Amino acid sequence: MYAIIVTGGKQYRVEKGDVLFIEKLEVEADSEVKFDEVLAVGEEGKVKVGAPTVVGASVAAKVIKNGKGKKLNIITYRSKKHSARRMGHRQPYTKVEITAINA
């Protein structure tokens, strides 16, 4: 069984046991989180699509950890002005493991 969920402005296709890196959630590690915004739920040969979400469907997940991604180096350069600027960015994330899909 699989589901398509929305979190952090992105859509994810998930199955039980999947480990995902999603946009940061304000939750502690080793806690449970529930995703109620389920766009579709499917099994072998049978798919239930919501309009816009499937009524009564949810996905439960366990938070493994919160962290930051690898550093991105951004260089802004203005030609003929002798001006350059270096910036770095580390995107925060939450690592979750899908524990159950309730259709």
Image: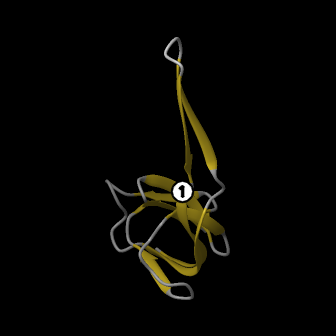
Q: Amino acid at mark 1?
A: Gln
In this rendered view, identify the residue nearer to me: 33 or 49.
Answer: 33
**Left or right side of 71 for 22:** left
Could you tell me residue 79's position as x and y percent? 53, 14
Task: Give above or below for 24 relative to 45.
Answer: below
Residue lying at the far front in this picture: please name it.
82
Q: Residue at x 54, y 19 (%)?
A: 82
- Looking at the image, the residue that sits furthest to the bottom is 30
Which structural element holds mark 1?
loop
Residue at point 54%, 56% (across, down): 91
Mark 1 Cα-neighbour bin, 10 Å: few <14, some 14–19, many ≥20: few
Observer-nearest of 99 and 40 = 99
Which residue appears at 51% of the width and 88% of the height? 31
Residue 4 located left or right of residue 51: right
How many numbered marks, from 0 up?
1
Q: Is residue 42 visible?
A: no
Q: Position of residue 60 (x, y in %)?
A: 50, 79
Q: Camera-side residue: 97 or 56?
A: 97
- The image position of residue 35, as x and y in percent, is 43, 72
Colouring of the image: secondary structure
Q: Quadrant of residue 13?
A: bottom right
Q: Circle 1 is placed at which residue position? A: 91
Q: Position of residue 38 (x, y in %)?
A: 42, 64
Question: Which quadrant of the structure image shows residue 55?
Answer: bottom left
The residue that appears at 58% across and 70% down in the rendered structure is 67
Q: Which quarter of the rendering shows the N terminus?
A: bottom right
Nearest to the observer: residue 9 or residue 24: 24
